[in-house]
Image (spheres, grey):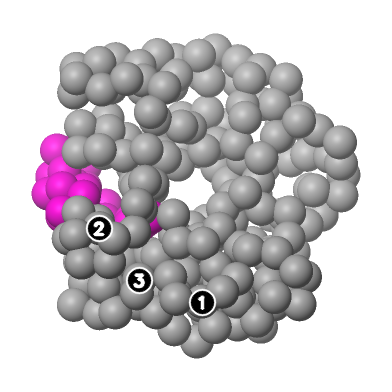
C-alpha cells in the first residue's frame, strides 16, 4: 500500500472508532509522527492530506522545517525535551506535548517571554511510572498543571500520556481512562478548560479514542517502519 493508502486507512479507522464511541470524528485530530522519516516522505504525507506532523528530536525537526518551509502543515513537538532545548521549541510549534517537570515549564515560560509569545503545551503524565519514559508521576500531576497554568507565557491545553506497550490494545485502555479522569479532576480543581488529551499510537489509538483522545500520534501505520541510520 502507498503512504496515501495508509493515511486513508488510518483516517477511516479514526472515524469508525469515534462513531462507535458516540463521538464526532472531527473531535479527534491525527498527528502523523514523522520522526526518522525523510523530507520526501514528509512532503508526500502532507500532499496526501496530513495536517499535523509530530517530531521527537529538536535537531531533526528544525532541519525538516527548513527544508519544507512554506508547506501548509502544523508541527507538534512530542518527544522528551531537555531543558537546554527549550529555546528551540517555543517558536514554530502548534503544540508541545511533553512538559513533565517544573524546571522545564519555567524555562519554556522564560524563553517564550523573550520571544513575546505564549507557548501552547500539554502536561505529560507517566501513569505507569516507568523509569524509561518521561512524564510527571500521577500524584504530582495536578501540582505541575497548576504551576504551569500560572505562568504568564505558557498556555496549558491538556494532558498527554504514553502507556506501557501491550500486544492487546485493550490492555492499554485503563491508562487512557485514567488520563481522562485526571483531566476531569484537574478541570474541577483549577477551572482550566484542558480540552486536549494526547494519547494513542499506531497499535492502540482506537482504544484511546474510546476513552476520549482528541489527538492520536500515529507513525508506523502511516509511514511504515522507521528509517534509522
Which is nearer the eye, 16 or 197? 197
Name the residue at 84% across, 39% down: 68
Q: Which circle marks residue 187 in the picture?
A: 2
Name the residue at 57% across, 31% down: 223
Residue where numbered disc 3 is placed: 145
Write down the quadrant of residue 152 in the picture: bottom right
Label 3 element class: helix
Residue 7: x and y in percent read: 53, 20
Residue farthest along the bottom direction in this orientation: 103
Say whether residue 71 is left or right of residue 220.
Answer: right
Q: Residues within 10 Å of mark 3 (few under 14, many from 20)?
A: many
Q: What span is in magenta?
A: 158-181
Residue where numbered disc 1 is placed: 151
Would residue 175 be visible to someone looking at this image? Answer: no
Would residue 217 be visible to someone looking at this image? Answer: yes
Residue 187: x and y in percent read: 25, 58
| Quadrant of image for the C terminus | bottom right
Say whether residue 161 is left or right of residue 95.
Answer: left
Tell me the CA gap for discs 2 and 3: 10 Å
Q: Establish if 10 lies above or below 146.
A: above
| Quadrant of image for the N terminus | top right
Name the residue at 35% across, 71% down: 145
Label 2 element class: helix
Amino acid at each position: 500500500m502507498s503512504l496515501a493508502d495508509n493515511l486513508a486507512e488510518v483516517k477511516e479507522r479514526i472515524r469508525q472508532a469515534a462513531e462507535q464511541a458516540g463521538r464526532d470524528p472531527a473531535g479527534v485530530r491525527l498527528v502523523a509522527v514523522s520522526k526518522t522519516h525523510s523530507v520526501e516522505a514528509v512532503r508526500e504525507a502532507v500532499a496526501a492530506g496530513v495536517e499535523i506532523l509530530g517530531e521527537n528530536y529538536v535537531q531533526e525537526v528544525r532541519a525538516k522545517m527548513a527544508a519544507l518551509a512554506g508547506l501548509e502543515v502544523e508541527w507538534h513537538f512530542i518527544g522528551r525535551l531537555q531543558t537546554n532545548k527549550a529555546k528551540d521549541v517555543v517558536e514554530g510549534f502548534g503544540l508541545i506535548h511533553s512538559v513533565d517537570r517544573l524546571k522545564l515549564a519555567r524555562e519554556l515560560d522564560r524563553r517564550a517571554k523573550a520571544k513575546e509569545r505564549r507557548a501552547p503545551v500539554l502536561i505529560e503524565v507517566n501513569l505507569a511510572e516507568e523509569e524509561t519514559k518521561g512524564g510527571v508521576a500521577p500524584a504530582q500531576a495536578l501540582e505541575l498543571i497548576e504551576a504551569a497554568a500560572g505562568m504568564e507565557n505558557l498556555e496549558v491545553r491538556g494532558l498527554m500520556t504514553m502507556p506501557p506497550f501491550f500486544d492487546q490494545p485493550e490492555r492499554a485502555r485503563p491508562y487512557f481512562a485514567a488520563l481522562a479522569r485526571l483531566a476531569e479532576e484537574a478541570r474541577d480543581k483549577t477551572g482550566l478548560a484542558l480540552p486536549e488529551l494526547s494519547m494513542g499510537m499506531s497499535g492502540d489509538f482506537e482504544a484511546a479514542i474510546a476513552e476520549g483522545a482528541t489527538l492520536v500520534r500515529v507513525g508506523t501505520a502511516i509511514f511504515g517502519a522507521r528509517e534509522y541510520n
